[in-house]
Structure formats: C-alpha cells, structure tokens
Image: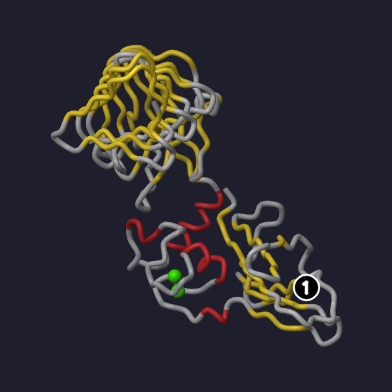
C-alpha cells in the first residue's frame, strides 16, 4: 500500500489513527498531530516522503526512512516510539526559530534506536539568528548509531552557515552557530531597516509588496520597506551600433573572487524556453561606492523582428 506523492495523511490533535496493512510506503506527507500507530509488516518513508507532526508515531516495524523526518508543523516536537533507520537519501530537518525546545525549535524524541544516515539539515526560520552560545538539543534516542554523511569534523554546513554538532550516545545538539559571508552581508544590510522584523527579514519575503523580494532589493539597492517602481531596476533596449538587444541593471559590487550575491540573467523569445546568459558584461559604469551599472548584450543576432524577453534571478551565494 502507498501514500502517493501528492497525498497527505493527517492525524488531528487529540485523535488516534492506525495504518494496518502488510507493507506500507509513504511517498507523500504524513502529519502526526495526534497519535499514529504503524501496525504494518514493513514501513518505508520513501525518498519523497515527509513525516511531520506535533505528537507521536508508534511503530511496530522498524521505521525505514529514505525521505524526510521534520518534527512539528514548523516548528514543534515529535516522538517516535520504536526504532528508526536512515538510508543515504534520508534527511532529518531541524527548524530553529528561537531557543524554546519543541516550541520555537524542533525536537525529535525516539524511544528506541535511531541509526543516523543521509543528511542532518538545520533550517533557520523567521529571521532568527542564534548566538554562538545558544544550543539546540534537536534529537534524543535510547541509542544512537551510524553517522550523517554531511557532518564532518563535528560540524554541519547549511544554508546560513555552520553549527558544531555535539553528539553523545543518546543526544544530538547544535551549537556555536557561525554565519557565512552571504548571510553576513545580507543581515548587515537588513539591519538598516528597523521596521522589518521576524519573517519579514527573510530573503524570500516581500514585506512592502512591490513584487521585489528582499534579496532582489538587496541586489538592486532599493528599499525593502518602501514599494518601488519595477522599471527602474532592469532596462532593455536595442543598441544603435551592434543592433543587439541589451539589458542593464544596478549591480551590488562584490569582493573579487568571493561573491555573496548571484545574478543570473536569462533571455527568451517565447517566455517558455529561457537561456542563461553566461557572457561577461559588455559595459560597467560606476554608480556609487556600493553599486555599478552592468550592461549585457543578448547573443541573438539582428535583424530583430521578433519579441525578446529578459529576466533576472538574484539569490544569495550559499
Ligand atoms: Ca519588496
Ligand atoms: Ca521596495
């Protein structure tokens, strides 16, 4: 029996549910906000499967995880009564948005054995950035075996930076957070906008509702708390001499060899197929100490008697 990739099985708070069949493969989402009993001969959380929830999973067979175990429904505490194994594709996702266990950061408690495998994936949420002295006990089990593939020399590197991973025979704790260069630059810029707090500070957020995400505002040098007119940021035209399309936009100056922002320019003739423009800028003009105006030329040769579109993806270099 299978839970399909687009399907969700949810046990509501206060409720009890049971899966009673021979073998069961989860390819979708199982949310244990109540108590879920796995009374199957085998139970596999497949590579696309996600186990979540704020309550408990009681498993009769070994819970074979090939997918994601993510306590809470962002964030929370989940208990597993039974034994868990993790294969190479497995992910243990620990959301961290504060220092309160099971409330503002994730906690998984396993009463049996937990065989580590695959990836340990910390995720910082709601704009929260831990102090180096903060520690987060994200996993406990009666016995811990195995190892995560992405923990090296007692450290895990993830989107925002690095945690030390302190592992005992029964617990896993994340501490000594060190921010990477991209988030250091981004957060320093964001600190200049005191009205933006919590989740409004995230790179993907658009708190002023102007269609530019915060990371795009960072890349263009616009104000993330004040709506902008879009045309000011990306201008296209046909160059009088070369006859090629050109696009120009303000670009934050980067440390040589160590960019903290990635600007990816793409061209299209039909808005369906997009080509990444990999050639260097044909012109660079100074704007101020932080920004320069970059000009790129489309490779499509004249005559240009058809439509042409450009778009720009800006993301942090992590
Ligand atoms: Ca915006
Ligand atoms: Ca804005």
Residue 226 visible in the picture: yes
Number of other residues with Cα within 10 Å of mark 1, as a class: few under 14, some 14 to 19, many 20 or more: many
Whether label 1 lies within 8 Å of ligand 2 gets the answer no
The residue under the point 56% across, 81% down is 231
Question: Can you name the residue that lies furthest to the bottom here?
Answer: 240
**Residue 100, position in %: x, y?**
25, 38
Task: Give the residue pinned by disc 1.
Answer: 297
Picture layout, residue 149 above or below residue 133: above
Front position in the image: 177 or 156? 156
**Residue 89, position in %: x, y?**
52, 28
The residue under the point 22% across, 31% down is 55
Picture layout, residue 206 above or below residue 92: below
Quarter that holds the N terminus: top left
Q: Quadrant of ligand 1?
A: bottom left
Type of colouring = secondary structure
Q: Quadrant of residue 76?
A: top left
The residue under the point 67% across, 65% down is 265
**Residue 254, position in %: x, y?**
65, 60
């Amino acid at each position: 029996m299978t839970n399909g990739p687009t399907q969700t099985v949810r046990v509501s708070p206060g409720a009890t549910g049971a899966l009673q069949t021979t073998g069961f493969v989860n390819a979708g989402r199982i949310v244990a906000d109540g108590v879920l009993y796995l009374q199957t001969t085998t139970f596999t959380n497949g590579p696309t499967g996600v186990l979540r929830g704020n309550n408990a999973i009681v498993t009769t067979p070994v819970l074979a995880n090939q997918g994601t175990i993510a306590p809470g429904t962002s964030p929370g505490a989940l208990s597993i009564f039974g034994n868990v194994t993790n294969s190479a594709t497995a992910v243990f996702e620990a959301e961290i948005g504060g220092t309160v266990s099971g409330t503002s950061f994730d906690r998984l408690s396993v009463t049996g054995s937990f065989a580590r495998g695959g990836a340990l994936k910390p995720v910082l949420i709601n704009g929260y950035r831990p102090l180096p002295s903060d520690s987060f006990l994200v996993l406990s089990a009666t016995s811990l075996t195995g190892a995560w593939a992405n923990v090296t020399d007692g450290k895990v590197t993830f989107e925002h930076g690095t945690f030390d991973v302190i592992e005992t025979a029964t617990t896993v704790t994340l501490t000594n957070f060190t921010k990477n260069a991209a988030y250091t630059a981004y957060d320093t810029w964001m600190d200049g906008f005191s009205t933006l707090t919590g989740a409004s500070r995230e790179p993907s957020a658009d708190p002023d509702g102007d269609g530019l995400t915060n990371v795009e505002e960072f890349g263009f040098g616009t104000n993330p708390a004040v709506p902008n007119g879009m045309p000011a940021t990306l201008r296209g035209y046909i160059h009088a001499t070369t006859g090629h399309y050109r696009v120009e936009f303000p670009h934050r100056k980067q440390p040589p060899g160590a960019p903290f922002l990635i600007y990816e320019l793409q061209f299209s003739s039909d808005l369906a197929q997009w080509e990444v423009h990999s050639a260097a800028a044909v012109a660079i003009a100074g704007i101020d100490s932080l920004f320069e105006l970059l000009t790129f030329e489309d490779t499509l040769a004249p005559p240009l008697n058809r439509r042409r579109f450009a778009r720009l993806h800006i993301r942090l270099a992590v």
